[in-house]
Each structure stands twice: as structure tokens, then as C-alpha cells.
Amino acid sequence: MSVRMVDVTSKPEVYREAIAEGKIRLRRETLELIRSGRVEKGDVLTASQVAAILAVKRTPDIIPLCHPIPITHIAVDWFYGEDYLGVRVKVKTTAKTGAEMEALTGVLVALLNVWDMVKKYEKDEKGEYPNTLIYDVRVIRKFKQGG
């Protein structure tokens, strides 16, 4: 069995965007530390936003068969629930292929960075993470203009 990149040579370059989102379940005390800016490692949302942006730009380095595309815009937005922190990543491009892998990668890396920054507060007495969970990661919108 072999693998190969899909040939997009004959496809036209068109405007495309993808929006993905995901959530990380955290203890309410941890969510309050994030909201109040009292996490020891620093500003969780800003650091995780930067991590998402870098991940979007590096997606072809992480996902082997993903085409490198010219990223024209990245937006990272946060939202809170009762027991979670959510992130939404929008990626825009003018390319021959879509940006959903970039949006998904941005979401996952943002959430992993949150986990890294707050893991101290999420561990139980055995050093485990019984409640922390990254979940509901999905593409919520994919758009292509023309082509």
C-alpha cells in the first residue's frame, strides 16, 4: 500500500474559508483562573491564540499529505461554557484546495496549549487528569467561492 498527495494541478485557485471549533472540559476553578488572569504560566488565551496561528501556518509540516496553501487570514475566538473553554478558528485562503485541515489543526493546538498551561490545576492527587477532556472538534463551515 502507498500514499500520495491528491493532484490539484488542474483546479483553479479560488477564495476558500473553513471554520472549525472544539472544546476543552476544565474544572470550574481552572476556568475562573483563566478568566481572572491568575494562571501561573501567564495569559492562557493569548498564548493559545498564538499557538493556533502558528499551527495553522505549519499544518503541511504536521499532516503529511496536506497541500501547503497561502494563508490570507486567521481568526481565533474563544467562548466559555459552564464547564468548558471553547475555541473557533477561521482560516481564509485563495488556493486550489480547502483550508479545513488548517482550521482543525489550529483548534487542536490551541486546546493542547490550554491544557499545557493549566495542567497544574487539573491534576488530581495521583497526578492524573480525571475530568480534563478535549472534545467536539469539528468543521462547522466550509466555503468555496466559484471554481
Image (cartoon, helix red, strand yellow):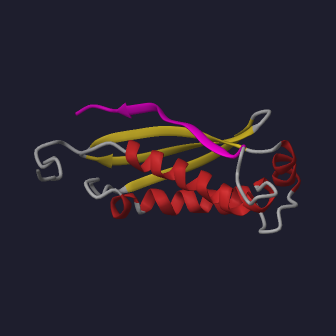
Which residue in the rendered view is the most extreme toward the bottom?
41
The image quadrant of residue 88 is top right
Quadrant holding the C terminus: top left
Q: Residues in magenta?
A: 131-147
Q: What's the residue at 78%, 67% (across, down)?
A: 42
111 with respect to 91 (left or right): right
92 with respect to 66 (left or right): right
Q: What's the residue at 29%, 53% (across, down)?
A: 66
Whole-percent x, y for residue 102 in the image: 42, 50
7 with respect to 138 (left or right): left
The verdict on residue 132 being magenta is yes
Q: What's the residue at 64%, 43% (across, down)?
A: 133
Q: Is residue 90 above or below residue 63?
A: above
Q: What's the residue at 15%, 53% (across, down)?
A: 4
Whole-percent x, y for residue 143 in the image: 38, 32
The image quadrant of residue 68 is bottom left
Whole-percent x, y for residue 15 in the image: 34, 41
The verdict on residue 137 being magenta is yes
